[in-house]
Amino acid sequence: MTTQHIQLTEHGRLKHFLSIEGLSKELLTEILDTSESYADMSGKQIKKVPLLRGKTIINLFFENSTRTRTTFELAAARLSADVITMNIATSSTAKGESLLDTIRNLEAMHVDMFIVRHALSGAAYFIAEHAAPHISVINAGDGQHAHPTQAMLDMFTIRQYKKRFEGLKVAIVGDILHSRVARSQIQALNTLGVEEVRVIAPKTLLPNQVRQMGVIDFHDMEEGLSGVDVIIMLRLQKERMNSAFLPSESEYFRCFGLTEAKLKHAKPDVMVMHPGPINRGVEIASTVADGPHSVILQQVSNGVAVRMAIMSMIISSSGGGA
Amino acid sequence: MTTQHIQLTEHGRLKHFLSIEGLSKELLTEILDTSESYADMSGKQIKKVPLLRGKTIINLFFENSTRTRTTFELAAARLSADVITMNIATSSTAKGESLLDTIRNLEAMHVDMFIVRHALSGAAYFIAEHAAPHISVINAGDGQHAHPTQAMLDMFTIRQYKKRFEGLKVAIVGDILHSRVARSQIQALNTLGVEEVRVIAPKTLLPNQVRQMGVIDFHDMEEGLSGVDVIIMLRLQKERMNSAFLPSESEYFRCFGLTEAKLKHAKPDVMVMHPGPINRGVEIASTVADGPHSVILQQVSNGVAVRMAIMSMIISSSGGGA
Amino acid sequence: MTTQHIQLTEHGRLKHFLSIEGLSKELLTEILDTSESYADMSGKQIKKVPLLRGKTIINLFFENSTRTRTTFELAAARLSADVITMNIATSSTAKGESLLDTIRNLEAMHVDMFIVRHALSGAAYFIAEHAAPHISVINAGDGQHAHPTQAMLDMFTIRQYKKRFEGLKVAIVGDILHSRVARSQIQALNTLGVEEVRVIAPKTLLPNQVRQMGVIDFHDMEEGLSGVDVIIMLRLQKERMNSAFLPSESEYFRCFGLTEAKLKHAKPDVMVMHPGPINRGVEIASTVADGPHSVILQQVSNGVAVRMAIMSMIISSSGGGA
């Protein structure tokens, strides 16, 4: 599925934000630059600008996520938008047709933006394709396809500490096969021009022909972490454990959990990242998660700023700022 | 139950909005006229006025309804009110006394308005009757009694397309017996002076002595739709199917579902309406729901504007505009 | 557990509000004085001040409470703060460590205040102790430990009617053993200098060595109510009935329920209070709850004002008012 055209207006501005795929290095860089000002604002006493006053944003969550939902709610509130959160059980909208009816009804209420999270890959794309022209859609995670705002907050965090993308070696560790986060990160890292993207995982958790994604694959942590600037740990979905992909949590931790010992193979100033919520002692040791290399909480902080930036760029594209 | 007096202030202004019954043609027309300006506003970049700033509105939903709740939340937000939504399981307030305790507690918090939805007929009326003098109540649907804001948005939509009520023939099709929507629509249509209100339904879904409601009853679609200007389809509550009123969904659709073939019996410029959510292939064919005669989504749009109008008229009656 | 130091800034201003314990008479009086202006405001047409504009308050409710949650939401909205309510099942954060991770993530989003309700005693204290320096915590009820905002709204209500604390005799009736409300009330009453605090309960519902709390214990209503100025009834948790502490609801009502007959033993101008929600006919007769001595709904009204006062004092302490 190509999401290149649908994401941009005829003038090349951001209309929807569905996937990193098809977005240019210039546009990704503009998102990072815009995020800077919102990141500065977060520390201020009054964290509020009237940019989206009178705009209506619907948090359309077909899949639960306290953390992502909360950062979007905060981002929208700090831009002065009206936000309504709808938690919709996937069961009641399993058929494409009734999902469309839900969307048609909401857009009839003159809302301006949908933040969509859905267990099916392509759901946000489907909604963007079928929504009325005045509606914008932000993908807050669709199945195993993409989670582009997570990828952009990760890119922002890398640039914040490393000041550049050129020359960086980045390793992503864990369940690459099922991870929408990893897919979006790999696209963003390659677009922004890092030197090397590595994935480290057991073979059962890697896609076939993974190298076509623009990565080098490793099955051994020490080898894969050797000399990297950035380590991105993925959350191990506990439900995968039962599905026979993996022997046990402790066995997984022994092989692919990030410990201080394994960390020594990376560069001395390596950054440790994780999209959260972390499973302590499963994919990451507590000493590493809370240690000096970890920027995990900084990622969360940046999440609000980056989402504010993306929302504000989209509304500006529609000529709609207050 | 007469709701005539309680709905109006001593100066004849709107204090509560509980039922169409007992409201004059002039007052209904004023609601429609006030709604015009809010309908115009919905298309604007900034859809917000400070009319209810500092007012507190409680969405008191004893019965779930995503759509109605959302339009009321949007309407209140666009009037700048503070809105708190409370979903209250009916079980915990089954006794009238504990419902009253809930109301007493909320009014002690100096709220200004309750939007009430309840499975029991008369619940909104009961609350209005017992609430403190400074509180207004809007009925967002009570049992099988009334759903007056739905009726008013339907009237607004009819006037928008037909420019008048005089001379119109309107057919309401479906489960009239259990429908609070139908009851309020019939009252509004008759008050506003349409030429003829027809109801079309199997005999098991019509009240006894239905003609006393000011309608003509039909049991055959072709006959009933003949020459009408407006068709209002009602949602078929699937739970009724089980209660032996109806043989099967497909049998119902064959007899009372609105198809393109049946539509031909109406006037060429007939409007097709439905309060939503629609059951495609049960009471209405998808080709009709999405076809050129359908104004179903326009009804949803108008729902926000009409609810803003009613809220603002009520607050103005209390001398309370900002 | 001493909460004395952590609640105050180095200048002795309110930083957190976790417990009445350790707060001075002067500070409690300042809270009551500040609440006066917010209580006046509640009756106004526009009940809103911009004091907390741009501040983010998280309602962190690990235990459900419609009433307390609603008054905090209203209080925050009327101070113009952005409020996000999170209902978190205790199960998913049973381990202290993962509770901390939740807190760390939320504080990374640059929120300003947590309103915490938790089934475990000490939870709010634990969060305050571990939160980032810019975060304030208000305890909205933790296990059987404390419910200090409830106690302060009760003190405000007593002062409103009695104009003083000196010379007052106050009786608290019911399940003292398990009541966080009673614990906080006893501390507040003693700090503010009432003449006598009595507790009236069956022996099974009194703590061992209850007199060390600064109260006189009674096991008979007539004796305990004799000559008191204020009666505070506690809610009987129905789940306690099953745990063999009590024979039956009707037996409890006969012995410890507040009736008009028992009320006669108190002073003629006695106030009757209850934190709500009341169990009519279990701990209090309806005629008393709705009678001329009852100030139960006034307590609810005052709850919003007192919570606004506490929030605003805390934000001012951080130098953070808008």
Image (tube, coloured by chain):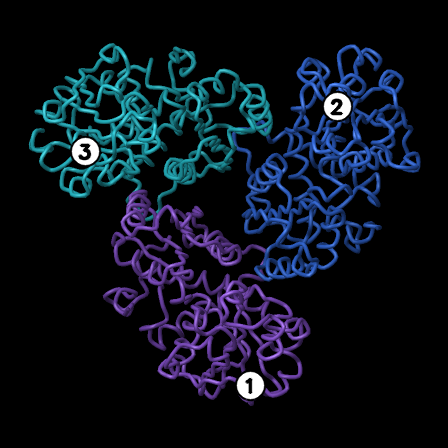
Chain colours: A cyan, B blue, C purple
Q: Are marks 1 and 3 in contact (CB under 8 Å)?
A: no
Residue C152 percent location from the top left of the image: 44, 70
Left or right: B162 in relation to C82: right
Question: Residue B141's image quarter?
Answer: top right
Q: Amino acid at mark 2?
A: Ser
**Distance from the alpha carbon under mark 1 to that under mark 3:** 65 Å
Look at the image and tell me whether residue C48 can be seen: no
Look at the image and tell me whether residue C171 can be seen: yes
Residue A35 percent location from the top left of the image: 30, 31
Left or right: C156 in relation to B66: left
Q: Viewer-proximal residue, C197 or C133? A: C197
Identified at 26% across, 18% down, the residue is A206
Regarding mark 3 in the picture, which secondary structure is present there?
loop
Q: Amino acid at mark 3?
A: Gly
Instruction: Give the class, few, some or many, for how many residues have Cα within 10 Å of label 1's Cα (few <14, many ≥20).
Output: many
Tell me the number on the disc at residue B248: 2
Tell me the number on the disc at residue C225: 1
Q: Amino acid at mark 1?
A: Leu
Relative to A319, say whether C113 is above or below: below
The residue carrying mark 3 is: A257
